[in-house]
Image: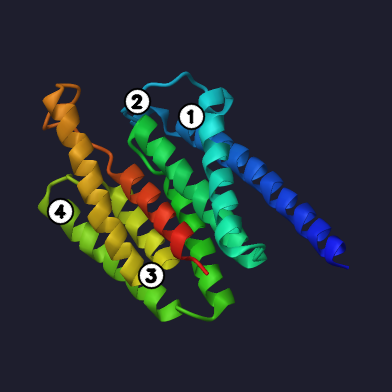
Amino acid sequence: MISDIFFLDYIIFLSFVMLVWLAGRGLLAWSGRLGTEYHDELEHFIRVQEPIEENKWLMLWSIAIPLICVGVAYGLNGMKYQLIFSVVVASVFLVQFSLTDFIWQIIFDKQLALFAILGLSRLFFLGDGLLDGLMAGAVGFAAFFLLAVITRGGFGGGDVKLIGAMGLWLGSELLLTTIVWGIIIGGIVALLLIITKKRSRREFFPYGPYFALTGMVLFLLTVH
C-alpha cells in the first residue's frame, strides 16, 4: 500500500515536470510571436540570437528555473498537488517576464493579463486571502502608477502592471517585501552598470526582472 502511494506521487511529480516543460516552451514561443508582432516598438536591453523560441539558452532558463522551484517546493512541503501547481504557474510566468524585460525592455500585456486571471482564479479556488490579494493588486498598481508619473519613466508601464498582477499572487505583506528588495537589488545593478559605463543615467533600466524573481523566491518559500 505504501509503495503504491509513493509510485503515485512519483507519477504525479513527473506530470508536473512535463507541465513545466510544456509551459516553459509554450510561453517562450508565445513571447517570440509577440516580439514579432510588436517588433518595431521594442528596444533591446540584452541582444540575443533570434528567434528567441529557438534559442537554446533561453529555453534552458524558461524550463530549468521553474523545475528547480518545483523541486524546492516538493522538498519543503512534500507532494501537495495544489501547492506545486501554483509554484509551476507562478514560476514559469515570472521567469518569462524577466526574460522579455531583459531582452526587449517589455513585459507583454497579454501575458500579464493571463497571469493576473490565473492569480485571481487561484484566490477564488482557495477561498482564503481574496480580499488581501485584491487590495494588494489594486494598491500596488496605483502606487507604482504614481511612481511612474513622479519619476517620469523611472518605472515603466510593464512594471506597474506587473506589480498589480503579482499582488494577486503574493498578498500585501509579500508584495511590499518584493518591492523593497526589488528596488534595492535593481538599484545596485543599475549603479554598477552606470559605474562601468555600460549604461547611462538617461537610459531606461528594466526593474521588472528584479521584482519578478524576488517575488518568485518569496512565493516559493512561503506558499502553503
Q: Nearer the viewer, mark 2 or mark 1?
A: 2
At x 36%, y 54%, the residue is 162
Residue 46: which disc?
2
The residue to which callout 1 is attached is: 36
Relative to residue 99, is residue 149 drawn left or right?
left
Gap in angstroms between the C-alphas marked 3 and 1: 34 Å
> Mark 1: which secondary structure?
helix
Relative to residue 121, is residue 39 drawn left or right?
left
Sequence-earlier tag: 2 or 3 = 2
Image coords of residue 111 (percent x, y) = 48, 49
> Mark 3: which secondary structure?
helix
Image coords of residue 208 (percent x, y) = 32, 45
Asked if residue 69 can be seen in this view, the reply is yes
> Mark 4: which secondary structure?
helix
The amino acid pointed to by label 3 is Gly
Gap in angstroms between the C-alphas marked 2 and 3: 31 Å
34, 126: nearer the viewer: 126
Sequence-earlier tag: 2 or 1 = 1
123, 196: nearer the viewer: 196
The residue to which callout 3 is attached is: 171
The amino acid pointed to by label 2 is Ile
